[in-house]
Image: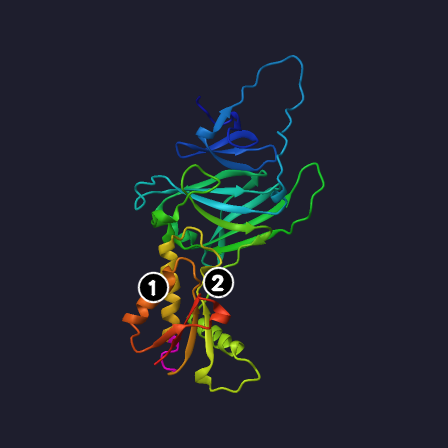
């Protein structure tokens, strides 16, 4: 069915609809809803609603009741990125969707940072437990997405609800992931593999982990001091430094990372720590790697046997760590 400007349409994959106000490319339009906000939509996800003449004016159709879920009482919001050509990732453009996995309507504004200002890329309203198309973009504009922000106001219609604070969530994007097929994974929101970026989980806005080299050194020094019992006098060189290499202790978000990516990141932290303490002869460092399948432990032992042959290493205290840690002595 041909759709043209001014047509009244409804959405096939979510609740609502409105009037087509303008086209964006060949397969996308902006639809103005009853609230006056314009929402981008794919043509294939719209159907024209025919206005049949009638002698009696009927009441406007009611919106479909919102199906609420217990977990939906907490805000859960994601951005989903899908490649237009999954088999040609190096040339492919992308689609961006906003995913509202909550029982709340959301007024939203999706932006990117430009110098010291912000530029709105898409704004409008998204209904509870739905996803909407926001934009299509090419690889040439990926640099614009290195800093994005989503502003939100949550509410419910025609019923009491718990008040949610208005939010502004800034996110630093690792745009390199857009070039890696393995970063686009199976998910609960799309039939296709997608790069899913959490914005809010269980009412908690995403927090970025930014650790500079100076910050890492300071944290390691603080950690070593904290680990030393106050009632024991020992030489600084003999203080035990404890480094937890479990990935959840190193990164807030591991979405899109393969086991290989995780292992490489853990080994980078292993090398960074040994480099930091290379000048402290006799320094004992405990690396907590866990038992698991022994992959990280084996990788650490391999590095110690090849790159750090002079260093001594042994199983750390069984009483403290079980079989899940290795103690390295700097030589």
Q: Nearer the viewer, residue 214 or 258?
A: 258
Considering every residue shown, the one lying at the far left of the view is 306
Q: Main secondary structure of the magenta part?
A: loop
Q: Position of residue 278 (x, y in %)?
A: 36, 78
State the SS at label 2: helix
Relative height, residue 149 to residue 41 (above, below): below
Q: Position of residue 270 (x, y in %)?
A: 38, 68
Mark 2, Cα crowd under 10 Å, few <14 / some 14-19 / many 20+, is: few
State the SS at label 1: helix
Residue at 33% over, 43% down = 92
Residue at 49% over, 77% down = 224
Contact between labelled residues 2 and 1, with CB atoms less than 8 Å apart: no
User: Which of the two labelled residues, at mark 1 and mark 2, occupies the earlier sequence position?
Assistant: 2
Q: How is the image coloured?
A: rainbow
Q: Which residue is mark 2?
A: 249
Residue stretch rendered in magenta on the structure: 276-280
Considering every residue shown, the one lying at the far right of the view is 160
Q: Quadrant of the C terminus?
A: bottom left
Q: Which residue is mark 1?
A: 299
Q: Position of residue 25 (x, y in %)?
A: 40, 35
Q: Is residue 277 magenta?
A: yes
């Amino acid at each position: 069915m041909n759709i043209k400007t001014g047509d009244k349409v409804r959405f096939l994959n979510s609740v609502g609809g409105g009037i087509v106000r303008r086209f964006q490319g060949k397969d996308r339009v902006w639809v103005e809803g009853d609230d006056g906000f314009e929402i981008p939509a794919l043509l294939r996800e719209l159907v024209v609603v025919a206005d049949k003449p009638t002698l009696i004016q009927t009441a406007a159709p009611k919106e479909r009741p919102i199906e609420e879920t217990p977990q939906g009482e907490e805000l859960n919001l994601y951005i989903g990125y899908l490649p237009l050509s999954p088999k040609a990732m190096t040339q492919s453009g992308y689609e961006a969707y906003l995913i509202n996995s909550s029982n709340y309507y959301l007024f939203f504004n999706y932006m990117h940072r430009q110098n010291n200002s912000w530029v709105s890329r898409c704004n409008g309203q998204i209904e509870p437990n739905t996803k909407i198309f926001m934009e299509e973009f090419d690889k040439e504009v990926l640099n614009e997405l290195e800093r994005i922000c989503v502003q939100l106001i949550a509410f419910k219609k025609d019923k009491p609800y718990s008040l949610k604070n208005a939010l502004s969530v800034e996110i630093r994007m690792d745009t390199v992931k857009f070039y890696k097929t393995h970063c686009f994974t199976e998910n609960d929101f799309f039939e296709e593999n997608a790069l899913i970026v959490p914005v809010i989980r269980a009412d908690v806005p995403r927090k970025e982990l930014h650790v500079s080299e100076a910050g890492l050194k300071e944290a390691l020094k603080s950690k070593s001091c904290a680990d030393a019992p106050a009632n024991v006098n020992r030489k600084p060189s003999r203080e035990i430094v404890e480094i937890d290499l479990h990935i959840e202790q190193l990164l807030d978000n591991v979405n899109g990372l393969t086991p290989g990516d995780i292992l490489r990141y853990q080994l980078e932290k292993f090398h960074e720590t040994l480099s930091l303490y290379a000048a402290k002869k006799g320094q004992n460092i405990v690396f907590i790697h866990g038992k698991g399948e022994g992959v990280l432990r084996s990788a650490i032992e391999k590095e110690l046997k090849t790159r750090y042959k002079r260093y001594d290493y042994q199983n750390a205290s069984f009483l403290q760590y079980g079989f899940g840690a290795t103690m390295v002595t700097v030589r």
